[in-house]
Image: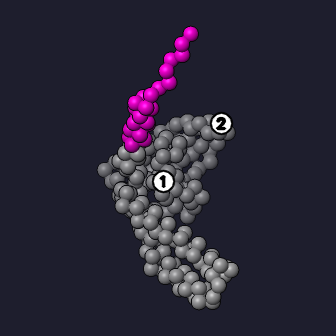
Amino acid sequence: MTRPAPPGPAAAAGARDARVDALRARLHRRRVTARYITPEGFEQLRAELERLWREERPRVTREVAEAAAHGDRSENAEYIYGKKRLREIDRRIEFLRKRLDALTVVPPREDQPDRVFFGAQVELEDEDGAVSKYRVVGADEFDVARGRISMDSPLGRALLGRSEGDAFTLERPKGPVTYTVVAIRYGPGIEDASDA
């Protein structure tokens, strides 16, 4: 019985090309996927970038220079920690610069104030009568403790497009829960759920 010949270099190259093409397609989809953020969230990220660049980085750079002046750098904990902190700051600055360029600022919608869209503050009542408030925001600004949920989260996706009075069931790990949309608000300066 003869065995089939193992795939030759041409077959291996073809498989590799197919994998590379698939990877490029996935990366392209990620690049063209819009990342949304509220004007307030964009301003917070921009302010963080400014603070890191104008205040934090110069301060840490001075501290590293002072620590380096003390001599042997290999055993100088202040110098080693300072350099590590400086690398962390530089990575965050680079991330914020790229991220701010990639984000799309979405102002609150005013054409349909009775429906849930990006940036809306929504008041929900569950089947037990408990009321909770959430603001639908982008992935870069979600903070569950402050009632800010990502539009990509299960609850965020379930809320989009809903109107006051709509009821829906959300599957959770601890079981399904039915919510009713009690109120929808838009506008600059609406408080976070923790402030209400």
Whether tag 2 and tag 1 are in contact, CB under 8 A, the answer is: no
The residue positioned 63% from the left and 89% from the top of the image is 70
Q: In this view, does 116 lie above or below 108?
A: above
Q: Nearer the viewer, residue 29 or 39?
A: 29
Q: Residue 19 placed where, x, y %?
A: 44, 36
The dot on residue 173 is none
Residue neighbourhood size for the residue with mark 1, other residues' Cα within 10 Å, grouped as few (<14), some (14–19), many (≥20)? some
In the rendered image, the vertical position of residue 35 relative to residue 98, given as above or below: above
Q: Is the magenta stretch mostly helix, strand or loop?
A: helix
Looking at the image, how many numbered discs can be counted on the residues? 2
Q: Which amino acid does label 1 sit on?
A: Ala
Q: Mark 2 points at which residue?
A: 175
Q: Is residue 93 magenta?
A: no
Give the position of the C terminus as an image quadrant: bottom right
Quarter of the image with the N terminus in it = top right
**Amino acid type, label 2:** Gly
